[in-house]
Image (cartoon, helix red, strand yellow):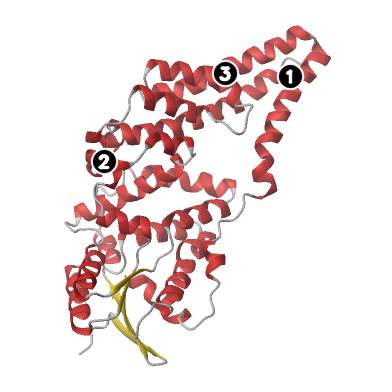
Amino acid sequence: MENENVHRITREGREIILIGTAHVSRESTELVDRIISEEKPDTVCVELCKPRFEAIRQQDKWQQTDIVKVIREKRTSLLLSQLIMASLQRKIAQKLNIVPGAEMLQAITRAEEIGAEIVLADREIRVTLLRTWRKMGFWSKMKVLPDVILSLFATDEITEEEIEKLKKQDVLELALQTVGEKLPGLKATLIDERDLYLAHTISGAPGSRIVAVVGAGHVPGILRHFDDQIDIELLNRVPDRGLWGRFAGWFFSLAVVGLFVAGFFSSGSQASLKMITWWAAITASFSALGALILLAHPLTIVASAVSAPITTLHPLIAAGWVAGLVEASLRKPQVKDFLALANDILSVRGFFRNKITRLLLLVAIVNLTTSIGTFVAIPVIMRFF
């Protein structure tokens, strides 16, 4: 009798065998291995994107990361969010004594052995995260950020109910769906769009016999949309930040400079000078505080303080980036930090101990405290009118 997690779709002489996997079950790995061995498909589709595929196949990929390049290209937030998500995955997997993505790895290994073509069927995680972030409003971001931070402390205790959920979907799906439940408006980006993407990729895979390995939670959506006309370019498009998003920083900078000028004409040069002094003192103090919280190098703390009064008035640079670049030059991550990364992301202490994650946190925290400093400074300088 066919397993209930195996679905067969026949279209125009082609057969697609869709396997819905329970990612914490070793039975799923055995099922994937058996189906591919018996069916000997032309193509095997796996619910992975290129970065996730490389993470599974190239365990030493982190050793090749140029952390300075990451900071310069302003990708620290994206990398940090991926590491936090990886932390959640690995902690749950460790609690349940499983290997994350074992059934996907088995599918790839078996496909290579029989000479089948491998298709990475999922949308790139970077696109999913960016589409989600760009579609979130300010208050939605403020609502979800505490949950992301708290996830570092979470999963110390896993309930029976949570284990049952994990038997029906993988850890990444659970993490994304949890966000989707807290912010229903994001479910379309996090879950539904990927159902469409997977359906499109699997239906268009080459060969007459295809095996597709996906999380069980995606199966209903894939079956529902399998014959739909899907605009894949739309699903891959990262929304623009919009007019306000592109120019908000400049508007803010001009407004602050306008306050200095207004202070000069309304209260004289002394008042304007005091406004600038207070602005510099407050933003520098808050920026330095962020670097101090991360126990950054003394020169990094100084660099954060010196740069803050300028970076707060220039939307294209940020104090956190300055702090990160200075810290990276003074305390450059070593090979051992990359080797220890997989284990260090499992704990808050590890996040702060590892030079790579501490650098990413430094950028984020200094940017955050500097932003707080600007909001504190504005009412202070307005008193001099």
Three-letter amino acid code at the position of disc 3: Ile
Q: Nearer the viewer, residue 119 or 356?
A: 119
Crowding at dot 1, Cα within 10 Å, few <14 / some 14-19 / many 20+, comes out as: many
> Distance from label 2 to label 3 (Cα)?
35 Å
x, y percent for residue 139:
57, 46
- Residue 299, image x, y percentages: 41, 16
Give the mark, 1 or 2, whose residue is nearer the N terminus: 1
Q: CA distance from mark 1 to mark 2?
A: 46 Å
Residue type at mark 2? Leu
Query: Which quadrant would the N terminus be assigned to in this image?
Result: bottom left
Q: Position of residue 256 (x, y in %)?
A: 70, 26
**221 vs 353: above or below:** below
The residue beneath circle 1 is 260
Q: Residue at x 66, y 50 (%)?
A: 242
- Looking at this view, is 221 or 210 the one in front? 210
Earlier in the chain: of badge 3 and badge 1, it is 1
Q: Which residue type carries mark 1?
A: Phe
Foreground: disc 3 or disc 1: 1
Residue ID at (17%, 73%): 30
Q: Could you say where residue 353 lies in the image, as x and y percent from the top left? A: 27, 31
Which residue, given by chain and number where applicable, does mark 2 sit on?
A: 341
Under circle 1, the secondary element is helix
